[in-house]
Amino acid sequence: MIFLEFTIIIACLLLGTRFGGLGLGVISGIGLLLLTFVFGLYPGTPPVNVMLTIMAVIACASILQTAGGLNVLMCFAEKLLRKHPKYITILAPLATWTLTVLCGTGHVVYTMFPIIYDIAIKKNIRPERPMAVASVASQLGICASPMSVAVVSMISILGSAHGLTHVISLIDLLKVAIPSSFIGVLIAAIWSLRRGKNLEDDKEFQEKIKDPENEAYIYGGAKSTLLNEKFSKHAYLSLIIFFFAITIVVLLGAFEFLRPHIMVNGKEKILSMNLSIQMLMLAAGAFILMLCKVVPREIPNGAIFKAGMVAVISVFGVAWMADTFFHAHFQLLEHILEEVVKTKPWTYAIVLFLVSKLVNSQAAAIAAIAPMGISLGVDPKIMVAFLPAAYGYFVLPTYPSDLACIGFDRSGTTSIGKYVINHSFIIPGLIGVSTSCFIGYFLVKIAF
């Protein structure tokens, strides 16, 4: 029966990925129906706190994007890249990683792809080198951002767990995740410096540009740039408000005494970071909305809002389905897996990595696997160290940012190979994730 139930979960995940994140969430509802009505399992608990925090963060980031603050930030990144075009393979992934860390979403990379391509091709640098690793870097930055859905989910899960000897704070997580993912991106970028053939030695590329039309297509076209755009003072103000809110979030996570101490049923309780983030993000969004002349009806049309709402539904369905199965068989699974994950903690990273590929979402993978890890006695410090393993969806080139990267590379050097698995993102992804996990494991040994 357990095998059949698990098969249903895997089937829902595989089927859901064919329809994107929204499909993943709602098709998990089919799994829930079968587990409950057919197999008689009592429904688990949906991750309401996680979902509410995600919604608050997405609301603020969406209003920021509508106000123009996100374009201001990307304009600064473009200035850096165009100032040092020779180092595009190193600077591009560092720029996309930084943008994700600051904004909390990897979707900011879409605007950067045509800029990275334009710089690379004009310097006769194989576009695959900076573009593929930049796509990987934009996703690795998610595990290091205090505003990302994945980090917010992780903090929420760890914060609501009972019986932990050491409560993992936002600062605890960031002081491991930021340097480990940064080093992972840097190593992947260094490897990318000499990947593939130089354009002048690439026979396939040289054959393409023999055709004048192809050459014009590859090298020509309008110059992609944000440098000529004029940003209003309201766009700059929205970015200032957003960064001020991020700073407050980090300070509240670092210094517990700054959070309100409230009497509840005769006992003093400290306001959780979960609720603190929700309040601050909603308030920051409100200030941007009121002070920066944002048109409210345009907010739902932004890419961040759409992606964020899809993430909420995905986390809702997947985490609820996984929680239903896990809690129904907790004692048996604990007996089988407890010693394995305690003696071989790296197995937790492998499970997280594989599940993230199935669900195509770091947040959904964390929502499904992190509670199981806590219940099985995995050290929360190890879970923090292996947080980058939640980025496993680069294994197959089906994620939107990877597909967009391939589309923006008009030279065709960023591509999917004959055997599908041998695509442009596989090696930078493996280098970035494995390096990040290794550095993270080392850092938790000295940081806690």
Image: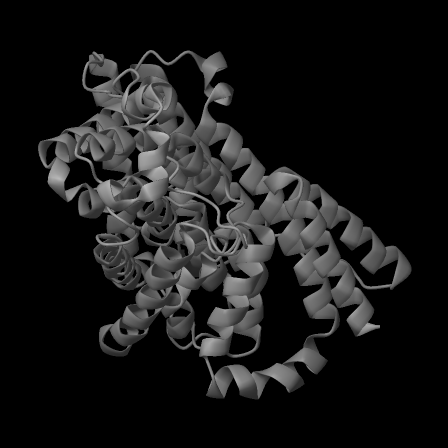
Q: Say which of 437 and 372 sits in front.
A: 437
Quadrant the N terminus occupies: bottom right
Does residue 98 appear in the picture of this structure? no
Place of residue 280 in the rendered image (x, y in percent of width and height, measured from the top left): 36, 38
Q: Position of residue 428 (x, y in %)?
A: 35, 56
Whether residue 56 appears in this view of the structure is yes
What is the image's colouring?
one colour
Left or right, residue 270 beside residue 87: right
Q: In terms of depth relative to the viewer, which is nearer, 245 or 133?
A: 133
Give the quadrant of residue 68: top left
Residue at the limit of the structure toward the left, as seen here: 83
- State whether residue 432 is above or below residue 334: above
The answer to which of 392 and 82 lies nearer the viewer is 82
Q: Residue at x 36, y 18 (%)?
A: 213
Q: Which quarter of the image is occupied by the C terminus?
A: bottom left
Name the residue at 47% across, 56% down: 422
Is the residue 410 above or below the residue 177 in the image? above
